[in-house]
Image: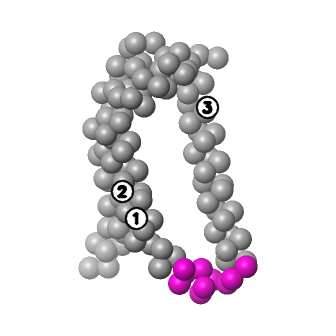
Amino acid sequence: MSPRKRLYLVTATFLGSAVLLLAGILLMSIHASGWDATVAAWQTVRPAVMAGKIIIMILIVWQWHAIVEWAGDRFGLPREDRRYLRSMRWRLAGAFAALELVLAQNLIGRILAG
């Protein structure tokens, strides 16, 4: 298997596992305490989760070159792939900002609501 395919496979596995874990935690919370209690708890911790999410996004963009070098060493990526990944830093930052606006801040829902 090529290093690039191995990197994609590991990344997809990690992200899929994280989504399944979060979905499982949410479902267990709803089953254990009910929908209303889960919504109330989310409203309580939401500011801390949002702050943590933004800090993680900033750290990823800030340390992007180190992350690319680590992944390149770990998965044996050639120099041209590393150069390409390093050039994707600001595109990644733009994608983080777009996802934050559209999904987390519900920009589309606010526009459609008028």
Closer to us: 31 or 53: 53
Residue occupying image coordinates x 55% and y 27%: 7
Q: Which mark is residue 50?
A: 1
**Sequence-first tag of 3 and 2:** 3
Point out residue 14 in the picture as x, y percentages from the top left corner.
Answer: 60, 42
Residue occupying image coordinates x 30% and y 27%: 87
Q: Which residue is mark 3?
A: 9
The secondary element bearing badge 1 is classed as helix
- Dividing the picture into quarters, in which one does residue 53 lie? bottom left
Residue occupying image coordinates x 42% and y 59%: 52
Tag 2: amino acid: Ile
Tag 3: amino acid: Leu
Q: Which residue is mark 2?
A: 54
Q: Is residue 15 above or below residue 81?
A: below
Callout 2–callout 1 Cβ contact below 8 Å: yes
Q: Is residue 40 above or below residue 71?
A: below
Closer to us: 114 or 35: 35
The secondary element bearing badge 3 is classed as helix
The residue carrying pointer 2 sits among few (fewer than 14), some (14 to 19) or many (20 or more) residues within 10 Å by Cα, namely: some
Q: Is residue 78 above or below residue 22?
A: above
**Sequence-first tag of 3 and 1:** 3
Question: For the N terminus, which image quadrant?
Answer: top right
Residue 104 shown left or right of residue 6 in the figure: left
Tag 1: amino acid: Met
